Amino acid sequence: MEEKKLDLNSIIGFVLIFGILIWIMYQNQPDPKVIAAEKAKKELVAKAAKAQELAQKSIEKAAVAVATTGDSTQLAQLQKNLGNFAYSATLPSAKNNFTTIENDLVRLKIANKGGFIVEAVLKKYEKFKKGSGQLVELIKNNNANLNLTLQTRDNRALNTKDLYFEPSLSKLGEDQILSMKLKAGANEYLEYKYILKPNDYMVGFDLRSQGLNQVLNTAKPLDLELDMKTFRNEKSISYENRYAEIYFEYEGDKIDYVGQGKDKEETPEKVNYIAFKQHFFSSILLTNTPFATSKLHSTNLVNDEAVDTTFTKQFKAYVPLAFTNGELDYKMNWYFGPSDYKTLKKYDKNLEKIIPLGWGIFGWINKFIFIPLFGFISSFLGLGIAIIVFTILIKIAMSPITFKSFLSQAKMKVLRPEITELGEKFKKDPMKKQQETMKLYNKAGVNPMAGCIPALIQLPFMYASFQFFPSAIELRQKSFLWADDLSSFDEVVQLPFRIPLYGDHISLFPILAAIAIFFYMKMTSGDQQMAAPQQEGMPDMAKMMKYMIYISPLMMLIFFNSYGAGLSLYNFISNLITIGIMIVIKKYFIDSDKIHAQIEENKLKAPKKPSKFQQKLQEAMEQAEAQKAQRNKK
């Protein structure tokens, strides 16, 4: 009977839960009025876009007719729609033609329509993998545009991206100069001038007007809009997307970025440059005349890695261009090239700061140690061997610190029986136990913090490596052992399914690094537990270390599976070397008997004067003890 009753109760419970869920779904269903309003709004937007598209096609058709036959009716229609700028549509250049300029590094294609770059190709870099035959394309197939909204004196708002510019290509020495003019008359025009030097990623970009002070409304600045959907260029779209970001320099030499996620926005003032940075490549607009204000917008386009495989982010920038004496005159530059620290630094415009090397001491380690050292080693060694040699040199340089850490652990291990004895003796008086323990440390000449300080010194180097390797473009598409690209994951097995957080593949270097971390922690945890007895009121460190032995390797497996193989290789070799150094130090440099004898000898000497920290700690303990005694009297 009890079993049947239980079953009946379970059924009633399930029915109630199901009923509650149905009620919640009913209560949260969208309001039909809201749905209808959203639908109507979308229809209006689509209708307006369609109308604009038809109007633009009509203008283009009229422009072709005027340019080829001089049709006066079509000319009147153009003048009605474009005002003074109908003149540009009457020229032979009013066709959807292109002009290409290139050097050994970049190829740029500029369209008559809009006058902006519609194709930017890097000739020294390939997409996805080496040997793919596909060059890196920063701009292609309408993924980017540049537009000025022209406010005319007869109350028109015209978009330059819809108007035709007249091209004129010339040379000055080895420099190629392309002038694109949007004309309102024979001597009235808006000009984009592109200047491409040989063997250079930087493109001169002058934007100026002549004779337009009677055509345009110069009372307020013109709005310049930059728009780019960044192409995927690397094997892992999620890893690449992590480093796609808008950086900007403002108010002198301050550097900041917009941030990751959906619809992120910043509005900096006095902007010197705006960088649409992908992982290893960047499109940067620089200006000699800072933009007074700006609105920078970034949104993530990768919602599902299996589906969203073409673009990573959508970047937009809105900046005002102010008139000077009724005309525009801006000296600017475009940079289309690699996000390479050394290449960017050569321009002496603070561009190298878009490389995320870390802040404070982490950035200093990368700039003044890691980059020069790795650059030197990789100049005569293959990249994989260079990482190994680089890691060995860093670990050798840190070995004195490692030695001090292990020596401190050995001293604490020798003192453990006496510390345990003090713990038993003053079990009921934790404060007294702490005071006596500190006296013991002082007599023995042992600093309990000595084991922590070396570890803290090594932490900045570890964090710096997490910034350095993902930013090292020299690792891109360089193979080593089974890894075909040290800047991306070293896939050895492709899984037929996706594991949350882990991914749909197995990388081998993270597994090796995880194994090395496991054995390192296994070897050191015993000494650490024996060296540092548990204190009253403190967490059980021995228990925590037991958990960390398994948690740390697991984290390495999960988070590093989609990271660059170069970083995983560095961590594997680093932990392997640390294990080797630890074995050598323990075997040849640390003798427990000698340490014990030295400690006993130190005890016989006059106690060393405690440090300021120890004095303050002792004073705090004595004060707390006095307060406790006073409370007990009451």
Image (cartoon, rainbow, N blue to C red):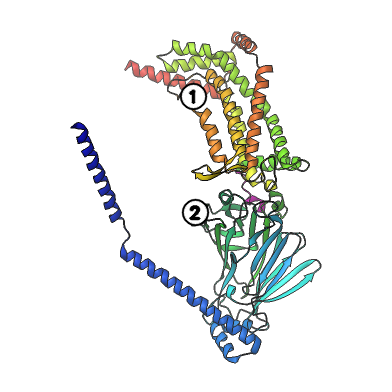
| Closer to us: 261 or 442 | 261
Residue at left 60%, top 83%?
63
Magenta span of residues: 351-358
Mark 2 neighbour density, 10 Å: few (under 14) some (14–19) many (20 or more)? few
Q: Determine contact: label 1, label 2, CB under 8 Å.
A: no
Q: Tag 2: residue type?
A: Asn
Q: Residue furthest right?
A: 173
Q: Tag 1: residue type?
A: Met
Which of the two discs, 1 and 2, labels the residue nearer the N terminus?
A: 2
Q: Is residue 482 above or below residue 325?
A: above
Q: Is residue 602 above or below residue 135?
A: above
* Residue 366 in view in this figure: yes
Say which element carries label 2: loop
Say which element carries label 1: helix
Residue hosting label 1: 541
Is 485 included in the stretch rendered in magenta?
Answer: no
Residue hosting label 2: 303
Q: Quadrant of the rendered structure where residue 149 is?
A: bottom right
Is 355 included in the stretch rendered in magenta?
Answer: yes
Which numbered tag is attached to residue 574? none
Q: Nearer the viewer, mark 1 or mark 2?
A: 2
| Closer to us: 16 or 397 | 16
Name the spot of residue 93 as percent of width and height, x first.
67, 79
| Closer to us: 453 or 323 | 453
Mark 1 neighbour density, 10 Å: few (under 14) some (14–19) many (20 or more)? some
